[in-house]
């Protein structure tokens, strides 16, 4: 008991309450936020007592990030935690003094957020996944799910720099797998249904959904449209599979949000963001939804099912 009490006091100076700004593309709290608060609790922080979380939601609209980030700066928060690469960019543009922790984001070095993973420099650190490493895996997994596929699409947002980079590494991999891949830019359409109509016109027989927060905010609609248009799809987040999507391969996002609390604690105890190396996720998950497969008349090969981390039946 004495050891636990000493650890708590060391993690949280007596009588001090901190304000943590949270910049998210979503519109409300969810399981990821619960994971973050659990991580904070591990270090002795309790929301509403010795720490106060101030959320700013973009409601799936990336162009809202700059104004929301400036608002958090005006709130005089001690740290800004960001979700997605555009959120991190907006926070970095809004302040050079307040520490910024990336709970999740794509290719922080390639996106110009940090100088390097080992020595991030500046006022930003946290976690990043390297989508250019993942992108070939997305194609391979999709081909395994639907071996006859030849014309997949990459449903993405051209205003998000990492997604352009993902597509560049996909093209030669698709060629090696006997496929031709096309970038279907969601920014060119008013509604997701328009993008699916374009995929039908272009005779695409499947697609990869880019791992951005705006898509996650609309995951139920996208999964429903994929079923309606009978298109096999692979996503970068397990939330799509839980919402009715066919399959996903990507990082354990809840684990990343819980790990973000470690960065918050280190910074609140005096460590500079520039001295905290940016981490990459150590675990990736492959999920398959057999209900979704049945909806589109797709039979998943048994050897692919055997390699899945989770199968929804």
Image: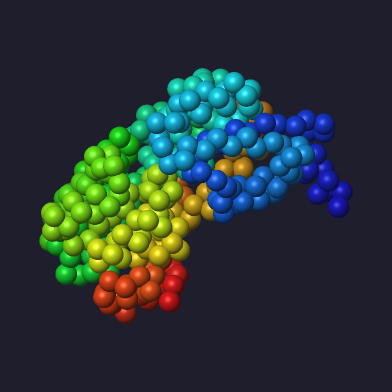
**Is residue 138 among the parts visible in the rendering?**
yes
Q: Report x, y in % for residue 193.
A: 27, 52
Q: Position of residue 281 (x, y in %)?
A: 46, 50
Residue 104 spot, x, y in % from top left: 47, 43
Identity of the residue drawn at 25% across and 42% down: 189
Instruction: Report the residue at 29% width, 42% height from top.
Output: 190
Is 215 or 3 nearer to us in this picture? 215
Q: Visible in this render: residue 176?
A: no
Query: Would residue 210 appear left or right of 90 to someone viewing this image?
Result: left
**80 displayed left or right of 290:** right
Q: How many marks?
A: 0
Say above or below: 20 vs 38: above
Q: In what quadrant of the picture does the C terminus appear?
A: bottom left
| Front-most of residues 110 and 190 | 190
Q: Quadrant of residue 65?
A: top left
Q: Residue at x 56, y 51 (%)?
A: 30
Q: Residue most toward the bottom?
A: 302
- Tell me the residue at 34%/56% (across/down): 222
């Amino acid at each position: 008991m004495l050891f636990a009490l000493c650890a708590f006091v060391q993690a949280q100076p007596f009588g001090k309450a901190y304000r943590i700004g949270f910049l998210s593309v979503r519109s409300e709290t969810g399981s990821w936020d619960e994971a973050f608060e659990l991580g904070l609790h591990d270090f002795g922080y309790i929301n509403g007592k010795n720490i106060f979380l101030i959320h700013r939601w973009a409601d799936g609209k990336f162009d809202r990030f700059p104004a929301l980030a400036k608002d958090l700066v005006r709130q005089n928060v001690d740290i800004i935690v960001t979700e997605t690469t555009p959120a991190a960019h907006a926070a970095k543009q809004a302040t050079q003094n307040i520490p910024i922790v990336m709970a999740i984001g794509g290719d922080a070095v390639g996106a110009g957020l940090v100088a390097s993973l080992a020595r991030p420099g500046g006022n930003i650190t946290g976690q990043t996944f390297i989508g250019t490493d993942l992108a070939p895996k997305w194609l391979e997994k999709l081909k395994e799910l639907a071996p006859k596929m030849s014309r997949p699409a990459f449903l993405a947002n051209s205003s998000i720099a990492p997604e352009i980079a993902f597509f560049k590494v996909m093209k030669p991999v698709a060629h090696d797998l006997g496929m031709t891949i096309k970038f279907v830019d969601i920014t060119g359409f008013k509604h997701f249904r328009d993008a699916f109509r374009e995929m039908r016109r272009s005779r695409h027989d499947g697609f990869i959904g880019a791992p951005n927060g705006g898509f996650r905010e609309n995951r139920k609609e996208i999964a429903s449209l994929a079923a309606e248009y009978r298109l096999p799809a692979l996503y970068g987040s397990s939330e799509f599979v839980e919402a009715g999507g066919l399959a996903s391969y990507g990082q354990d996002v809840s684990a990343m949000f819980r790990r973000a609390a470690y960065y918050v604690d280190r910074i609140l105890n005096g460590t500079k963001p520039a001295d905290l190396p940016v981490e990459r996720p150590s675990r990736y998950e492959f999920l398959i939804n057999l209900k979704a497969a049945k909806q589109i008349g797709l039979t998943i090969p048994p050897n692919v099912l055997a390699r899945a981390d989770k199968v929804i039946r």
